Image (tube, rainbow, N blue to C red):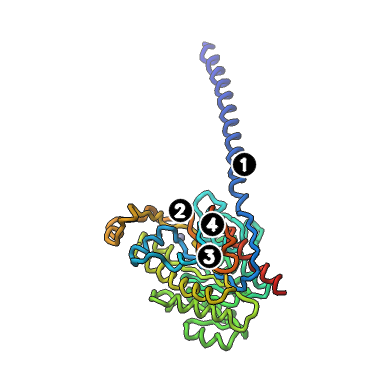
Amino acid sequence: MNKPVKEKKKITKKHKQIILVTCLIVVITAAISLGLWGGFYYQYGSNLTIESTEAKNIIIMVGDGMGFNHIEAAKIKKKLDSMNMEKLDVHGQIRTRSLSIAPTDSAAAATALATGYKVKNGEIGMTGKKTYENIFEFAKQKGKKVGFVTTTNAYDASIAAFSSHVRDKNMHDEIIKQQIESDIDLIIGIGKDKYEPYADQIETEDRAYCKTLQEIKKAGIQKKKIFAVLDDELTERSENKLKEIVSFAANALENDNNNGYVLLVEGAKIDTYSHQNDIMNMIEELSEFDRAVGHLKERAEGNSDTFMIVTSYYETGDLRIKNIEDATVENMEKENWFHSKKHTRDDVPFFAIGPGSTEIPSNKPLDNTDIFDICKQLIENYASSSS
Ligand SMILES: [Zn+2]
């Protein structure tokens, strides 16, 4: 009668040993992974030193969602040997990972470029309770004008990282309040419905609240700052609209200003159409973005005092092209070159021109936080050499 009880005791002991060993394995594995994870994720950035003192103006252009193959697909469709962005002097690639395990989102990616810090997906310009100074705030301290143009809602995460600090990218009202309180000289985007309730706070003695390009052109002469939501003009794609708006933006920031400016331009819908796997519309958006790049490139070439970098927050859609040499528009339409509807971990391209650009190493991938470091050093060097 005692036998089964004895057996039960034996099993229990064995079980205990197994549980102990399993626990040990789990703890050791977790410790190793966390160590590696921590080392991998917290030691980012290339510690670049940029010495140029000549960059008075900084232009950052982001083709959201644009990977290497997005550019190749656009060249196939448009029968081009190269896009304007590829005509910039320095080419390379950047890593896009955030502090989250999943591929980066727009909040973390834009925060990396804007502040030089990696955060978890969803966080904007801060992590936990710690806020990080962004490149616009830094540039303002050095007497520069700052502004952005985006083809999406001006309160979206990607732009919010340059104009606010919030723990969650969906805190749109808080983002808008911080934008209103900020010292940003020029805001051009869309999202009229969200901004309209704040109209009285946006319009000040110094700042014009505008809803058409015509209005901002007029306001540009009368007021120092511009806050514009151009829903009608920016939601409809047209050949040279973005080019015209970025030209206006650069003029407005240059006007009556001896200290230079920082301008961010975001071509946001390359990402939107990549999520939808809509290659034709993606290409049209990328082409419109590239025409704006072409315009600002000519401008940068005309003034030897402008540093410009064109890049992307991440690759969207896992776009792959089979037999790129034989690829045609016909098979682009027949086959789906996208292999995902999400952001991926792929590196993205960057292209740069102007003072400091040749100091950027192009033989190894940069980290997305390096873009902030490069811009910050250029601003700092210019300020200390001209003071
Ligand atoms: Zn996206």
Q: Which residue is mark 1?
A: 35
13 horizontally vs 75: left or right: right
271 versus 45 height, above or below: below
* Mark closest to the chain's N terminus, 2 or 4: 2
Q: Which residue is mark 4?
A: 362
Per the model, the C-alpha gap separating discs 2 and 4 is 22 Å
* Mark closest to the chain's N terminus, 3 or 1: 1
Per the model, the C-alpha gap separating discs 3 and 1 is 35 Å
What type is the residue that disc 1 sits on? Answer: Gly
Q: Quadrant of the rendered structure where residue 303 is?
A: bottom right
Q: Secondary structure at mark 4?
A: loop
Q: Position of residue 340 (x, y in %)?
A: 39, 53
Q: Residue 352, labelled with which disc?
A: 3
Per the model, the C-alpha gap separating discs 3 and 4 is 10 Å
Q: Position of residue 129 (x, y in %)?
A: 66, 58
Q: Position of residue 161 (x, y in %)?
A: 57, 65
- Decide: marks 3, 4 in contact (CB < 8 A)? no
Per the model, the C-alpha gap separating discs 1 and 4 is 29 Å
In front: 387, or 166?
Answer: 387
Inspect this view and state whether residue 124 appears. no
